Image (spheres, grey):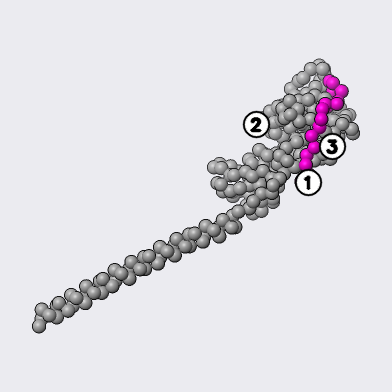
Amino acid sequence: MHMRKHQRVWQYFQQHRVASIVVGHVIVAVVLGLLLLGSTLGTHIFGAFAQSPCSSSDHSYIVGSGNTLGGIAVRYHTTWQRLASYNHIANPNLIYVNQTICIPGHGSTGSGGHPSVKGKGNYFPYGQCTWYANQRYHELHGIYVPWTTNANAWAWTNRARDFHWHVSGRPAPGNIIDLQPWVQGAYALGHVAVVERVLSNGHVIASNMNWGARHWEVTNVEFSPGPGVSFISYY
């Protein structure tokens, strides 16, 4: 009698143990399925929100390790404020690896979204700062400035905007620097030159003609960004 009671108890536990194992496996399978489904849905949902395709006229930059929005802006001759606004970035100090940053109009359009215009040659008088700046820019980029009228050196900043070139207060190597009259040694017609280097203090070394005593020679001169100074580029 006592032995049969033990056998019934043992059978009871065995049956429930098997049932528990089966139920446990079912639960695990259900949880794994939900996790997988959730992960897949999450990926699709995140992707739907994360995808922000750039305009066909934009350049797409993929953020790498160590990148900052300010650094990307300098690279593409723009400002971090413009990139943050254009890409709807709430915190400019927080960007992520593999995030796509759209550079507005880089390479094919200039200010205002209009195509930047290329010149066809160098029609300025030889030896003038305007002739040299146009020639040197062409040597570096294969592009001449397109403005040939109302084109004294001081007017280049406005003429650049007229032809949808980029104008900035921040220098980059290869930019044209435009000094307004009487700024940093320029005379009444202003002065243009080409940035060869940007120094660690933010100043630039620019190559020039028609500057200083030996005006017929190409000379390197240090200038600093500031009032009355702008930097011009096709890109």
Tell me the element at label 1: helix
Residue at the spot 40% in from the left edge and 65% down from the top edge: 31
Q: Quadrant of the C terminus?
A: top right
Kind of residue sitting beneath label 1: Gly
Tell me the element at label 2: loop
Rendering coords of residue 117 (x, y %)? 80, 37
Mark 2 in CB contact with mark 1 (< 8 angstroms): no
Q: Which mark is residue 159?
A: 3
Q: Nearer the viewer, mark 2 or mark 1?
A: 1
Question: Is residue 184 rendered to the left or right of residue 36?
Answer: right
Question: Is residue 206 rendered to the left or right of residue 91?
Answer: right
Rendering coords of residue 1 (x, y %)? 9, 83
Q: Earlier in the sequence, mark 3 or mark 1?
A: 1
Q: Which residue is mark 2?
A: 200
Query: Magenta stretch?
Result: 113-130
With respect to residue 228, does 83 lie above or below? Answer: below
Asked which quadrant contains residue 26, the reply is bottom left
Residue 115 included in the magenta stretch of the image: yes
Kind of residue sitting beneath label 2: Ser
